[in-house]
């Protein structure tokens, strides 16, 4: 079936996984209740939570925003193609699952460079018979290569939903992060969308201390940004209401139990 793997993980990929230092994707998986993590990740996650207990709410709010934004794109906006860059580890309600529940013919390309994610590519690549899913072992810092590989599955003459969920914080320089976003968006046709969310330190002072401690652990650092900086990633796009807001406030679901004000801001913008 078209929905089966087009890019299989290498048999030895799992051997490259470094379990001696914590990894943000695995910690995120731990906070979300997953099992694809190691003792070093759980220790780092617990230390972060001791300084900033609300981090689990941040993780959940980010994930819930991702789901709601994909529901909007596949539903109201009618998008049938998705490019999810910085996929992370599979949990419940992955991009293809949400999109293909609404539009079974949706096509999804996942992009990540982490070997543990690569080892789980098979789980990400099981979609509907009508649609198609693919996985690219690619680097956020090389947008041109990502687009070239994604073009083997997606039609870049038709609208695409670009997903950047909690990944641009791994690009420390703000202007470099904006340049990556601009380059990815430049490859997309009119009518495409950007769904983006990232962490801030606006609501709670403790989160910055927790993040500083994490960044000093030897793990790949993550930079918390201001809401204005996150809004800057949408320059030139037409923001979908309600704009760039705390994730729980973006088209909220009454069933969501996370606080309304939280240090995760996100938005959705349309390319004219």
Image (cartoon, grey):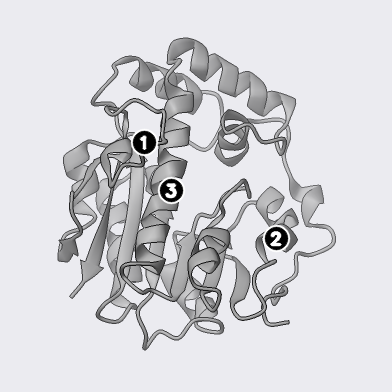
For label 3, the SS is loop
Q: Marks 2/1: CA distance?
A: 27 Å
Q: Report which residue position mark 1 lands on.
A: 223
Left or right: 256 with respect to 24?
A: left
Please name the residue shown 54% across and 70% down the image: 109
Query: How far across and how far down the image is residue 36, in percent?
Result: 71, 39
**Crowd tier of the residue under label 2, counting other residues whose Cα lies within 10 Å: few below 14, some 14–19, many 20 or above:** many
Looking at the image, tell me whether mark 2 or mark 1 is earlier in sequence order.
2
Q: Residue at x 28, y 61 (%)?
A: 179
Q: Residue at x 55, y 15 (%)?
A: 47
Q: Is residue 265 left or right of residue 147?
A: left
Identify the secondary structure beneath mark 2. helix
Residue 6 rendering spot, x and y as whole percentages: 69, 77
Cα distance, mark 3 to mark 1? 10 Å
Q: Which residue is painted at 20% across and 44% down in the image?
A: 229
**Vertical placement of 137 versus 186: above or below?**
above
Please name whichever residue, 80 or 51, is drawn nearer the observer in this view of the structure.
80
Q: From the image, state whether disc 2 or disc 1 is nearer to you.
A: 2
């Amino acid at each position: 079936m078209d929905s089966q793997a087009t890019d299989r993980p290498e048999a030895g990929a799992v051997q490259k996984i470094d379990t001696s230092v914590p990894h943000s994707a695995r910690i995120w998986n731990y906070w979300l209740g997953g099992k694809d993590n190691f003792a070093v990740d759980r220790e780092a996650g617990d230390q972060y939570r001791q300084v900033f207990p609300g981090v689990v709410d941040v993780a959940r709010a980010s994930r819930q925003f991702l789901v709601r934004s994909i529901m909007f794109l596949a539903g109201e906006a009618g998008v049938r193609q998705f490019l999810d860059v910085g996929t992370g580890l599979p949990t419940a309600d992955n991009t293809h699952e949400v999109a293909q529940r609404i539009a079974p013919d949706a096509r999804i390309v996942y992009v990540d460079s982490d070997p543990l994610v690569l080892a789980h590519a098979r789980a990400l690549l099981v979609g509907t018979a009508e649609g198609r899913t693919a996985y690219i072992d690619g680097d956020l810092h090389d947008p041109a290569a990502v687009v070239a590989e994604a073009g083997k599955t997606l039609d870049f003459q038709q609208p695409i939903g670009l997903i950047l969920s909690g990944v641009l914080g791994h690009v420390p320089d703000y202007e470099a992060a904006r340049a990556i976003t601009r380059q990815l968006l430049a490859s997309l046709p009119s009518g495409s969308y950007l769904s983006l969310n990232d962490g801030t330190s606006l609501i709670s002072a403790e989160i910055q201390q927790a993040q500083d401690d994490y960044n000093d652990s030897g793990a790949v650092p993550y930079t918390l940004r201001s809401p204005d900086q996150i809004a800057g990633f949408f320059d030139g796009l037409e923001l979908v209401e309600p704009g760039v807001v705390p994730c729980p406030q973006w088209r909220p679901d009454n069933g969501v139990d996370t606080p309304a004000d939280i240090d995760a801001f996100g938005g959705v913008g349309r390319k004219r």
